Amino acid sequence: MKRVGIYCGSFNPVHKGHMKIARRCISQGLTDEVWIIATGEYWEKKDLLPFKDRIAMLKLVAGKGILIDETYNELPYTYQIFRQLKEEHPDHEFHLILGADNLPRFTQWRNYEELLEYGFIILPRDEIGTRQIRKIMKDMDKEDYEILKMKPIDISSTFIRENMDDHEKIRYMIDRKVYDYLKDMEKTHAA
């Protein structure tokens, strides 16, 4: 049975932290693969880059075992994605990859109970450490989870977008291929 980590988000744009999380899930033996599912155009974010461009940038930096999905992107809720995945891939074991900052409000997610059926891979955040993660999981009566062994990542896609004219400020946050893609996008839209 293949173990697959499902990593959803806007990836607006993808940065080195996103890829580090995906690679760590594989290198720590928590998953065999990570499927990245970028959210479609339905989000109400004001500055969401076009979907096709976010997918293209993800493909530029995806490494071994990291697949960029283009199938489930228009499903607006995570439980819908998992429901579809389970139906189409009954021979796979799916795990939800999420940041610990999502845990305090997880019970507010639409049909969150369905997601509790799957394993969680949790990325610690500065504000929510291992002890607090364990308490939240215990309160949700959730035992099937792993805490990713890595330091919290302090990279912001918003900061990257706001500082595109200063490569030095963001070079440690974003892959050069992604940076070049974004700069080409700027030139195309300016023309």
Image: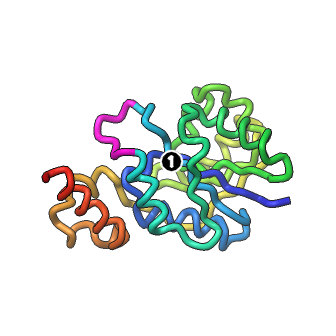
Question: Please, is residue 164 above or below residue 48 in the view?
Answer: below
Residue 71 percent coordinates (x, y): 60, 45
Could you tell me which residue is drawn at 55 percent across and 36 percent down?
104
Could you tell me which residue is drawn at 49 percent across and 54 percent down?
125
In the image shown, does 99 or 53 lie closer to the viewer? 53
The stretch drawn in magenta includes residue 45: yes
Could you tell me which residue is drawn at 58 percent across and 34 percent down?
75
In the image shown, does 51 or 117 lie closer to the viewer? 51
Q: Is residue 102 left or right of residue 188?
A: right
Could you tell me which residue is drawn at 38 percent across and 60 percent down?
154
For the stretch drawn in magenta, what is the main secondary structure? loop
The stretch drawn in magenta includes residue 91: no
Q: Is residue 100 left or right of residue 116?
A: left
Image quadrant where residue 150 sits? bottom right
**Which residues, given as a range, are shown in magenta?**
44-50
In the image shown, does 188 or 67 lie closer to the viewer? 188
Residue 119 percent coordinates (x, y): 74, 49
Could you tell me how many numbered marks the image carries?
A: 1
Helix, strand or loop for disc 1:
strand
Image quadrant where residue 176 sits? bottom left
Task: Name the residue tied to disc 1.
Answer: 38
The N terminus - image quarter: bottom right
Residue 180 percent coordinates (x, y): 28, 68
Q: Mark 1 belongs to which amino acid?
A: Ala
Crowding around mark 1 (Cα neighbors within 10 Å: few <14, some 14 to 19, many 20+) is many
Q: Residue furthest front?
A: 191
Residue 171 percent coordinates (x, y): 28, 72
Q: Is residue 153 left or right of residue 67?
A: left
Q: Is residue 10 left or right of residue 107?
A: left
Colouring mode (rainbow / by chain / secondary structure / one colour): rainbow
Question: Please, is residue 149 above or below residue 125 in the view?
Answer: below
